[in-house]
C-alpha cells in the first residue's frame, strides 16, 4: 500500500472516529454522570441499597444525596432556604400551598418546567388529565412545580365520598339489592326506616341506620347533597357569590334534621370524635356509612367487617348511588394532590431533564409492579394463569423482615406521585376484583351517567385578599351551625340568623374574589 493510500485510509478512520462521538452521545442521553441533592422528608440510611433506587441510578447514570428534613420543621426549613436562595437543585416538596407557590414563582425561587413534556409521556398524561396543572400556570402558561397526584380514583375526577351498605342486612329484610344499588333519595330514606323497624342485626338501641365517618362533624359535608356550595363560594353571572344563602342549604339541613329526629342517625353523634361513625360501622352497628371510601379503604373495610362480624363475606359489602330531587348524583371533584416536586432556580438543565426522566420511568407498569411487589423473579412472579404470586409473607416485609425494602422503596416513588398506583394493578393479590371493579369502578361509572359536578376552585386557595381570608373562619363555622340547627327545635331560625349575621362580610369577600380573579 502506498503512503498516499495509507494516509487517506488513516484520515478516513480518524474522521469516522470523530463523527462517532456525537452519535454515541445522541444514542445515550445519560452518558454524562450527574450528582445532585434532593430536598425531602422521605429517605433512610440504606435507601441507596433499595432495588428500585439502585436500578434508577444505574439506568439513568446518576447519584444523589438526601437533604432530609423532619415533617414538623418542614415549613420553617423550606421557607428559610427559599428566602436565602439556598434550596438544593431538586425538591420533593410537601405541604405546598398555592399563595406561597405563586409568591415564590414571582420572586424567582423556582425554575420553570419544560412547556413540552412529550419526552416524558407519563408525566405529560398526568398534566393533561388533572385540572390543578391549569391553575398553577403563570400568566405566560409556564408551570414551576409538578403536583404529586393522588391516585385514589383513576376512573374520573370524582371525590371518593360514597355510601357503603350491608348487603347481608338488606337481604335479611327483603331487599334484593345489587352490589352497587341505584336509589332515589326518597327510596334511600325508606330503606333506612325499614332497617330501623326490622333491625336485621338484632342490635336494639345500638342500631344506627345511617352513619357518617366523623358523625355530626360530617353533616355539613352531607348537606352538599342538596347544595354543593353550602360551605363555599361559587361563580354566578361573572362574579363570586356566597353559596350558603341558597335555599337548597336549608332544604338539606331540614332533611338531616328529619333523619335525626326519626332516630335514623346516632342520637349522640353530633358530639362524635373523628372516625367514630366509621368505627360503629366496622363494629357491625351501622347499616349504611357515608364516608371517604377510596378503593384501598373499601378493601380494608370489607376485611375488618369479616373479622368483626361472624359470617360476613366480602360480597356482603355494597355501595349505594343516590340521586337527589333533580335526578342527578351530586359529586365534588376529588382532592387531586397535596405535594409537588420542583426545581430550584439554579438547577442545571441536565439535572432537571434527568429527574423528569426518572419520574416518567417510575410511572411505567414495570416499575409500578416493582414498587408494589418487589423484584420480579425473586420477590414475585406470574404463575401459568397470569396470577401474581408473592414469594414472601407479611412478616418478611415488616420492619424486622429481610424484605423490608419492598415496603421502604415505595417512598422513592413518592418523590413523584402519591401512593395508590399499585391498588389498580390488574391481578394485585392484595385487592379483590369485587372491591375494585364490581364496587368502586361501577360506582364511579354510575355517577358519570348523570352527575351534577362541583369542580375544585383553586382560586380560593390562591387568593391574597384580606377580606376573603378574614371571612374563611366564619365560613368554616358552618359545620357547627349545621350541628346546632339539626339538634335544635327551630333549625330555620338558627340557620337564617347565621346567614343574616354574616352576609355583609361574605359579600365583601365575594367582591374581593371577583376583583382578584374575574376582572
Image: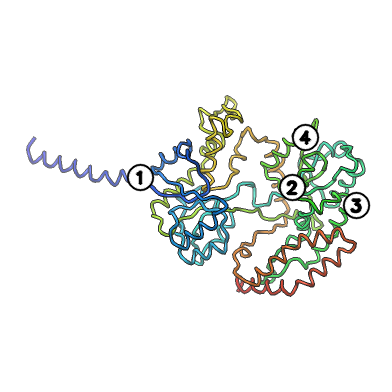
Q: Residue at x 57, y 55 (%)?
A: 95
* Image coordinates for residue 194, horizontal then vertical, percent: 90, 44
Nearer to us of marks 1 and 4 is 4
Please indicate, yes or no, whether residue 127 appears anywhere in the rendered image.
Answer: no
Q: CA distance from mark 3 to mark 1?
A: 70 Å
Please indicate, yes or no, whether residue 101 appears anywhere in the rendered image.
Answer: yes
Q: Is residue 290 left or right of residue 34?
A: right
The quadrant of the picture occupied by the N terminus is top left
Q: Of label 1 and label 4, which has the lower sequence position?
A: 1
Asked whether the residues under the numbered discs 4 and 2 touch, taking CB atoms below 8 Å apart as contact, a structural biologist would say: no
Q: Of label 4 and label 2, which has the lower sequence position?
A: 2
Asked whether the residues under the numbered discs 2 and 3 touch, taking CB atoms below 8 Å apart as contact, a structural biologist would say: no
- Mark 1, residue position: 33
* Image coordinates for residue 263, horizontal then vertical, percent: 89, 50
Q: CA distance from mark 2 to mark 1?
A: 50 Å
How many residues crowd mark 2 within 10 Å: few (<14), some (14–19), many (20+)?
some
Q: Of label 2 and label 1, which has the lower sequence position?
A: 1
Nearer to us of marks 2 and 1 is 2
Among all residues in the image, which is located at the extreme right?
Answer: 197
Asked whether the residues under the numbered discs 3 and 1 touch, taking CB atoms below 8 Å apart as contact, a structural biologist would say: no
Q: Is residue 197 left or right of residue 8?
A: right
- Mark 2, residue position: 275
Q: Is residue 496 left or right of residue 109?
A: right
Q: Of label 2 and label 3, which has the lower sequence position?
A: 3
Q: Which mark is residue 262?
A: 3
* On screen, residue 497 above or below 54: below
- Mark 1 lies on a secondary structure that is loop
- Mark 4, residue position: 308
Q: CA distance from mark 4 to mark 3?
A: 28 Å
Amino acid at each position: 500500500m502506498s503512503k498516499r493510500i495509507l494516509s487517506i485510509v488513516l484520515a478516513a478512520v480518524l474522521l469516522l472516529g470523530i463523527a462517532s462521538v456525537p452519535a454515541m452521545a445522541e444514542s445515550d442521553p445519560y452518558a454524562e454522570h450527574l450528582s445532585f441533592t434532593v430536598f425531602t422528608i422521605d429517605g433512610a440510611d440504606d435507601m441507596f441499597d433499595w432495588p428500585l433506587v439502585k436500578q434508577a441510578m444505574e439506568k439513568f447514570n446518576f447519584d444523589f444525596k438526601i437533604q432530609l428534613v423532619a415533617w414538623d420543621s418542614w415549613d420553617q426549613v423550606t421557607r428559610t432556604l427559599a428566602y436565602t436562595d439556598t434550596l438544593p437543585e431538586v425538591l420533593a416538596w410537601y405541604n405546598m400551598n398555592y399563595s406561597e407557590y405563586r409568591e415564590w414563582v414571582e420572586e424567582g425561587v423556582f425554575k420553570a418546567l419544560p412547556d413540552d413534556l412529550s419526552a416524558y409521556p407519563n408525566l405529560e398524561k398526568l398534566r393533561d388529565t388533572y385540572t390543578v396543572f391549569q391553575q398553577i400556570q403563570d400568566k405566560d402558561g409556564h408551570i414551576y412545580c409538578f403536583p404529586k397526584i393522588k391516585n385514589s380514583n383513576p376512573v374520573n375526577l370524582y371525590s371518593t365520598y360514597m355510601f357503603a351498605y350491608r348487603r347481608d342486612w338488606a337481604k335479611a329484610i327483603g331487599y334484593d339489592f345489587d352490589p352497587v344499588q341505584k336509589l332515589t333519595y326518597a327510596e334511600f330514606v325508606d330503606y333506612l326506616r325499614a332497617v330501623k323497624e326490622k333491625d336485621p342485626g338484632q342490635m336494639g338501641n345500638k342500631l344506627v341506620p345511617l352513619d357518617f365517618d366523623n358523625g355530626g362533624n360530617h353533616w355539613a359535608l352531607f348537606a352538599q347533597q342538596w347544595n354543593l356550595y353550602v360551605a363555599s363560594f361559587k361563580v354566578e353571572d361573572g362574579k363570586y357569590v356566597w353559596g350558603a344563602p341558597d335555599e337548597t342549604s336549608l332544604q338539606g339541613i331540614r332533611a338531616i334534621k328529619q333523619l335525626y329526629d326519626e332516630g335514623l342517625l346516632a342520637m349522640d353523634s353530633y358530639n362524635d370524635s373523628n372516625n367514630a361513625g366509621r368505627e360503629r360501622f366496622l363494629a357491625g352497628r351501622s347499616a349504611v356509612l357515608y364516608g371517604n371510601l377510596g378503593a384501598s379503604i373499601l378493601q380494608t373495610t370489607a376485611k375488618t367487617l369479616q373479622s368483626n362480624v361472624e359470617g360476613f363475606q366480602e360480597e356482603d359489602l355494597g355501595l349505594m348511588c343516590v340521586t337527589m330531587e333533580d335526578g342527578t348524583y351530586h359529586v365534588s371533584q376529588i382532592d387531586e394532590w397535596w405535594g409537588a416536586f420542583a426545581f430550584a432556580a439554579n438547577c442545571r438543565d441536565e439535572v432537571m431533564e434527568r429527574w423528569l426522566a426518572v419520574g416518567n420511568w417510575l410511572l411505567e407498569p414495570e416499575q409500578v409492579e416493582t414498587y408494589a411487589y418487589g423484584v420480579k423473579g425473586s420477590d414475585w412472579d406470574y404463575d401459568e394463569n397470569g396470577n401474581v404470586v408473592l414469594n414472601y409473607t407479611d412478616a418478611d416485609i415488616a420492619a424486622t423482615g429481610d424484605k423490608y425494602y419492598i415496603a421502604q422503596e415505595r417512598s422513592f416513588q413518592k418523590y413523584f406521585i402519591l401512593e395508590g398506583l399499585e391498588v389498580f394493578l390488574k391481578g394485585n393479590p392484595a385487592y379483590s376484583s369485587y372491591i375494585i371493579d364490581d364496587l368502586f369502578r361501577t360506582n364511579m361509572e354510575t355517577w358519570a351517567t348523570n352527575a351534577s359536578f362541583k369542580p375544585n376552585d383553586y382560586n380560593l386557595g390562591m387568593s391574597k385578599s384580606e377580606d376573603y381570608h378574614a371571612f374563611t373562619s366564619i365560613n368554616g363555622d358552618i359545620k357547627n351551625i349545621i350541628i346546632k340547627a339539626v339538634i335544635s327545635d327551630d333549625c330555620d331560625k338558627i340557620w337564617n340568623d347565621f346567614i343574616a349575621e354574616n352576609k355583609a362580610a361574605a359579600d365583601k369577600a365575594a367582591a374581593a374574589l371577583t376583583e382578584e380573579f374575574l376582572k
